Image (spheres, grey):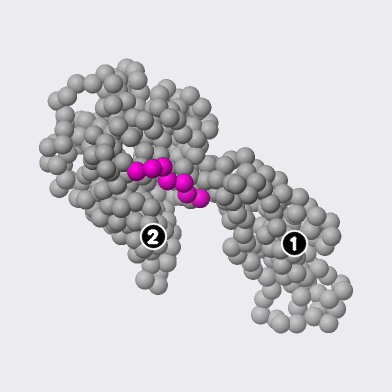
Amino acid sequence: MNKLIESLKPQLIDIFNHLHTYPEISWEEVKTTEYIENLLENEGINVKTFSDCTGLVAEIGHGKPVVAVRADIDALWQQVDGEFQANHSCGHDAHMTIVLGTLLAFHHSSEAFNGTVRFIFQPAEEKGTGALKLVEKGVVDDVNYLYGMHLRPKEELNHGEFTPVIKHGAARFIHGTITGEDAHGARPHLTANAIDIGADLNHYIRNIQVNPMIPHSIKMTGFQAGGKSQNIIPGSATFSLDLRAQTNEAMDQINDKLNQVVHMLEEYHQVKIELELGANVAASVTNNEAISHMAEGIQRAAGEDALKDPIVTTGGDDFHFYTIERPHLKATMLGIGCDLGPGLHHPNMTFNFNAIPKSVEVMVETVRRTLG
């Protein structure tokens, strides 16, 4: 199988270069979906697309167990060299290439196996809503084991190192609106200054406390109030909040305390404060059996020295909604060391491409071990 994967390397380079060159943001991955669909159909592999969303599913084999491998396919929208554009700075182009390489390796192998291997190309991970959409589509209802992956910064893993589990935290991004009335700068008693309300909100959320043994944070990441006239007290404003917690239970506690603070400020200032949930990402729910299979896959493909301890990160991934919504799933995410820098979501993020073929080997070995 290793020789087969090595022979696929030129094709993997072409695949990655195409996906990296044509990034698309969440729910707009139309050309990305078409590219993967055409590539697989040209290989004689049947795929399933969806009429109301991007993304697709392909599978080989038949029967039980059903082992699924998932790649996220969307890019970020960010400023690159002075211009805002779609940009694969989170490694999803690499994830797609690894999953496609795993699929092609099984497809071209003469090695027989029992069971079904399903390959899920999921949209809108960056929005935190893609996994839930595919759960709704039933793509994991009959799956026994589910594997994902993510490139890791060089501060976490060296090139050639792997971890069999990434323990992501939960994240919520909230857009808020303060609605009140403006007033003349000489008559501050006639209104509640939205800037003061924002300052109060920032003060109180910074004092929200949950179990200190659980990493967590809540912070204001944006605030806009007032216009060009310096003699008008603004009664309205908009703001954004970023919530993080290592467990889903801690996230719920933070969210409850935030709602209490907002209600208190509404009463005190006599204004309306509305919170709108944007992206919502759950903390990881993993399985020891799946982790064990992944660890064995790492050792068999990359050697014992390549196997490293689990990574705990406050970053999030909507992969974990699969196991929350379908508790029967045995799942884990592969962490890939690839000399990644300056960091995930940095507009100029780069990594060592040679991590891709080795990651394909790891995933192939993991799936083989899981199939038994």
Residue depicted at x 28% and y 34%:
297
* Left or right of 139 on screen, residue 116: left
Asked if residue 191 lies in the magenta stretch, the reply is no
* Left or right of 78 on screen, residue 21: left
Q: Which mark is residue 179?
A: 1
> Viewer-proximal residue, 46 or 242?
242
Decide: is 133 above or below 369.
Answer: below
Kindly give the residue lying farthest to the front in the view shown.
Answer: 305
Amino acid under label 1? Answer: Thr
* Left or right of 346 on screen, residue 277: right
Q: Which residues are magenta?
A: 308-314
Residue 272 point in image, percent of width and height: 77, 57
Residue depicted at x 62% and y 43%:
250
Residue 252 point in image, percent of width and height: 65, 43
Position of the C terminus, as image quadrant, is: top left
Is any atom of residue 303 visible in this view?
Answer: yes
Position of the N terminus, as image quadrant, is: top left
> Viewer-proximal residue, 129 or 312?
312
Residue count near mark 2 (Cα–Cα under 10 Å), binned few <14, some 14–19, many ≥20: some
> Viewer-proximal residue, 51 or 73?
73
Is any atom of residue 136 visible in this view?
Answer: no
> Viewer-proximal residue, 78 or 367?
367
Q: Which mark is residue 343?
A: 2
Residue 33 point in image, percent of width and height: 34, 43
Q: Quadrant of residue 79?
A: bottom left
SS category of the residue bearing label 2 = loop
Kindly give the residue lying farthest to the right in the view shown.
Answer: 189
Residue depicted at x 70% and y 58%:
207
